[in-house]
Amino acid sequence: MTLLFKETHHNKNLNALRLSDILGNYKSLMLHRQYAGYTLTSLFSYGTLFGIATIYPFIFMQSYHFSVVAVGQLFALNGAGILGMGLISPAIANRVGLVPWLRVGALGILVSGLVLLVASSVWPQSALAAIIPILMATTAIGVIRPTASAGAMSLVEPKVAGSAASMFSFASFLGGGISTLAISLLPFSVSILALFIMLFGAIAVVCALYTGSKSGVKEMAEVPVSRQAS
């Protein structure tokens, strides 16, 4: 990157790598209600994704007797859902607003878990009863990722953009790590996965509602996100 692109930002921050400044930025960011809402919604959406990725092969190989190759192809379909929705999501968010679209994604995760629980109970031998709801969940995750990222980064000034981006990404993958550990300790079954998706989806909905609350808008003026630690 250094060899291919020239530096375009000439206002250097000589204290950018000072630990006290970085920690000060992180503290201010997490006290910013809207930024925290976007970040936590992303955290639980990634938690859902990693939880699905952890248990997905076992469900389809043990419960539905799919081959390793077939499981890989099915999971690639979920990747296509995330990618496809990620491509069109910004255009939709521009029309309806970031927070309403974020709530749609969070609600989509919750609903997909409920559909998975009901469908797998009614048609326990049908693989489609699991394939379709899980695809719904991963598509909803594709709604959240670019929307939450855009919303979080739109709230900060350029001089703390690095801290904001790293905090957002760290939180997302922290959610993935926690969910992977948690679901690996549970029995591997479709119903467990459905309940897991519903739990993370419900928390994501709460975080998305928290993001757009009136008190959150008020806090934007009260908490200086761009504040630098002295």
Image (cartoon, rainbow, N blue to C red):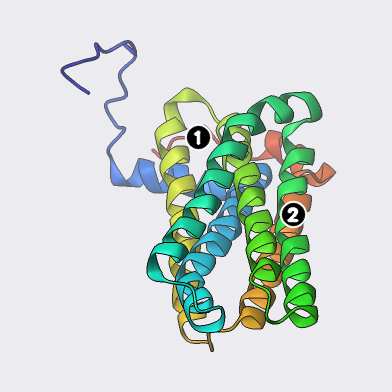
Question: On the rendered structure, is 82 left or right of 34?
Answer: left
Asked if disc 2 and disc 1 are in contact, CB closer than 8 Å, the reply is no
Q: Position of residue 211 (x, y in %)?
A: 73, 46
Towards the viewer: 5 or 68: 68
Q: Secondary structure beneath disc 2?
A: helix
- In space, the residues marked 2 and 1 are separated at their CA atoms by 36 Å
Q: Looking at the rendering, which quadrant does residue 110 occupy?
A: bottom right
The three-letter code of the residue at mark 1 reads Arg
The foreground one among 73 and 51 is 73
Going 58% across and 51% down the picture, which residue do you hit?
A: 42
On the image, the x and y values in percent for residue 138 come to 60, 54
Residue at 40% over, 48% down: 23
Residue at point 50%, 62% (across, down)? 175
Q: Is residue 56 above or below residue 185?
A: above
- The crowding category of the residue bearing disc 2, from other C-alpha atoms within 10 Å (few below 14, some 14 to 19, many at least 20), is many
Q: Image quadrant for the N terminus?
A: top left
Quadrant of the drawing holding the C terminus: top left
Which residue shows up at 53% across the image and 44% down it? 80
Q: Which mark is residue 219?
A: none
* Residue 24 drawn at (x, y percent): 44, 45
Between residue 117 and residue 74, name the one nearer to us.
Answer: 74
Q: Say which residue label 2 marks.
A: 108
Describe residue 47's horizontal placement relative to residue 13 as left or right: right
Find numbered disc 1 in the image and state the secondary structure of the residue it sits on. Answer: loop
Q: Amino acid at mark 2?
A: Gly
Q: Considering only vertical position in the picture, is 84 above or below 191?
A: above
Residue 48 x/y as whole percent? 58, 63
Q: Report the disc number at residue 227.
A: 1
Can residue 152 be seen in this snapshot?
no
Can the viewer see residue 160?
Answer: yes
